[in-house]
Image (cartoon, grey):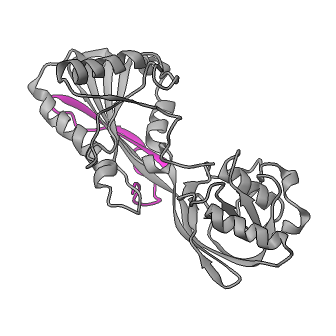
Amino acid sequence: MPGSGSSSPNSPTAPGPSTGYYDTELQTFPYLYSQGSATFAANGTDYDTDWFTYGPAGDVSAPLIVVSNLGCEAADYPAAVAGNIALISRGTCEFGHKTALAGAAGAAGAIIYNNAPGSIGGGTLGAISRPDVGPYVPVASLTGVDGSALVATINAGSEVVGNIHVEAVNEERYTSNVFATSKGGDKNNIVVAGGHTDSVPAGPGINDDGSGSIGILEIALQLPKWKVNNAIRFAFWTAEEFGLVGSEYYVTNLPEEERQKIALYLNFDMIASPNTAYFIYDGDGSAFNLTGPPGSAHIEKTFEDFYVKSKRLRAFPRCRHPCWRSLHWR
């Protein structure tokens, strides 16, 4: 996981050592570290549950109160929710918005259940805080089956007393992106190749994304054997699993003049999966009717020419964001 402490480094942004082939840079910045776990029980029965990133710690025992509709409006929260646990369906608005509305209504905690039979599978409140909506309260998730059963029990007139126990650490830490840019090649048309260096606690990160970061590191080690037409920048992103924190910080703080010098970006994430298939993102929108940023069609064609025409391999179009996502926020 990224970040090693809460103390500020001596230099937030600093050039790294120069090598014979690369100029390196360490970009250090603060971010909110968030890690935790949750348990939930109701009327003496333990339920499978998940914690939401950025959710606060706490221990709450109180009756469950069903929230109307999808809990996306303040009017959905009855007065009885004050001091109790809001039971909310997933859907339409972000988890964080629902949690903050529950806090604004005076709820002591919140349970968000899936709008499909299975589990939500973890997720994030999507923002560090939402002061314009309300305070966060201890929150956890339930499967659609369990949540719907609790709603039915309560609507039938029976009281359900729940207990939410959340252990969480939410604190400011410092972390760093690392860059290596070739000295040679056209600096006005830079090819950027990136992968993230963090992982989730549930896995060792060998594939997600040790494979991607090690893959581009090996390319960087081999590249000095060749002369390049375009400058090549290798980007090792931090805190990707917290919501693309490292890459978004880089882009947000990159001057527009420098942005225009980036010709294209190639992302390397989970490239060592054992169930390998050759997929190419649908840059031109011909397969999924979702076009990428300008230039994406040209990148797609370049890969098609390489895999299909040159290597005679079968390649399949793949939907690009927002058709799929690895982080759930609603």
Residue 275 image point, x, y percent:
28, 47
Residue 225 image point, x, y percent:
9, 27
- The reply to whether the magenta stretch includes residue 6 is yes
Question: From this viewpoint, is residue 138 visible?
Answer: no
Does 283 sit left or right of 107 as displayed? Answer: left
Residue 229 image point, x, y percent:
21, 14
Q: Kindly report the secondary structure that dominates the magenta region of the rendered protein.
A: loop
Residue 216 image point, x, y percent:
24, 37
Q: Residue at x 22, y 18 (%)?
A: 309
Quarter of the rendering containing residue 259: top left
Q: Nearer the viewer, residue 162 or 260?
A: 162
The residues colored magenta run 1-30
Question: From this viewpoint, is residue 145 visible?
Answer: yes
Task: Count the marks.
Answer: 0
Q: Residue at x 28, y 50 (%)?
A: 210
Single out the residue that lies furthest toward the bottom.
44
Q: Residue at x 32, y 27 (%)?
A: 192
Q: Nearer the viewer, residue 111 or 178?
A: 111
- The reply to whether the magenta stretch includes residue 273 is no
Q: Is residue 204 above or below residue 288?
A: below
Single out the residue that lies furthest toward the left.
225
Does 227 sit left or right of 253 as displayed? Answer: left
Quarter of the rendering containing residue 278: top left
Quadrant position of the N terminus in the picture: bottom left
Q: Nearer the viewer, residue 251 or 201?
A: 201
Q: Is residue 30 above or below residue 25?
A: below
Q: Residue at x 41, y 56 (%)?
A: 3
Does 180 sit left or right of 223 as displayed? Answer: right
Quarter of the rendering containing residue 78: bottom right
Q: Is residue 61 above or below residue 257?
A: below
